[in-house]
Image: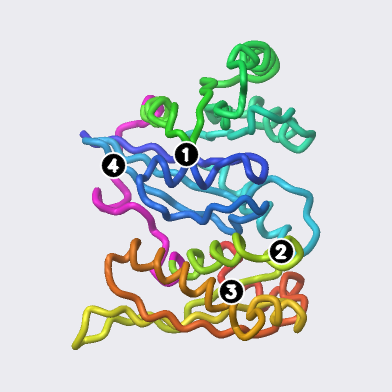
Amino acid sequence: MTKTVFATIIGRTNAGKSSLLNAVIGERIASVSSKSQTTRTRITGIKTIDDTQLVFIDTPGLHKPKNKLSNHMLNTVKESVADIDAVIFMADCTKKLNSQEEHMLTDLSNGKIPVIFVLNKIDLLENKSELVPVISDLSGKYSLEAIVPISVTENNGVDLVISEVMKLASDGPHFFPDDMITDQPEKVIAAEIIREKLLDLLNDEVPHGIAVTVEKMSEREDKDILDIDAVIYCERDSHKGIVIGKGGSMLKKAATLSRQELEKFFQIKVNLQCWVKVKEDWRNREGLIRSFGLTEK
């Protein structure tokens, strides 16, 4: 008899949700950046251990909406905790819970879905005993299945999170092939890798106004080369200039870093071509948000 469990990962931006997903799956399927609101859509990661299949759903971070894209992102979080077997609520142990986190935790506590509370970034604490009152306070306020202190960057405690999720698995068929790690199309993964490199390289005012789409992705018949054509969209002409850089230097640097990561992920030599286009205020234009694949299907 096989078992399955679906778990949604939620929490504020920069809590380490995507890093946890990557650590659990063992592959880089979700973009990771120090910039807030890196994850824009729901990302599914799949890990099959013996007869048990764990399906993890990474979601955008909790934040105050500033445009239509932000509203879509927050709706994704709400939809992702419906009809699920477990919620992994992730928080930064160096920060107090904000009102949005507390409100979400209260709602979840009053529901029937088991909540595994993950306190991330314990490597940043000088004294681990600081966690004792935090854990005590959480236990007193909320109905939680477990509280797990971890450090994703040091891969400390990730196995404990997996164990807690496995306890909640129930008898049922596997929904995905056992060797599958994500349901993300390869074009989407490629686009996210490129966007991640841009997030890391660009100034704070530019990254959130960037979207990346892969227009072409095909392997050559005569050579082991993967051709990828990508378009980088930004909201202003001034941002386009920053993305391209003086003499094309910024775009070349981003493309080089992206190509290296793409070759590592796809295990093949990559020929990457990038173009930059302007779509003014696209984050408030429903048609463009939809065409960039940033709404729930």
Colour setting:
rainbow
Q: CA distance from mark 3 to mark 1?
A: 26 Å
Sequence-first disc among 1 and 2: 1
Q: CA distance from mark 3 to mark 2?
A: 22 Å
Point 62% across, 20% down: residue: 126
Sequence-first disc among 4 and 2: 4
Q: Of tags 3 and 2, which is closer to the observer? A: 2
Amino acid, disc 1: Ala
Label disc, if present, on residue 7 of the rendered structure: 1
User: Secondary structure under badge 1?
Assistant: strand
Label disc, if present, on residue 203 of the rendered structure: 2
Magenta-colored span:
167-189
Snapshot quadrant of residue 127: top right
Q: CA distance from mark 1 to mark 2?
A: 34 Å
Question: Where does residue 202 sit, x and y in percent of width and height?
Answer: 66, 66
Q: CA distance from mark 4 to mark 2?
A: 39 Å
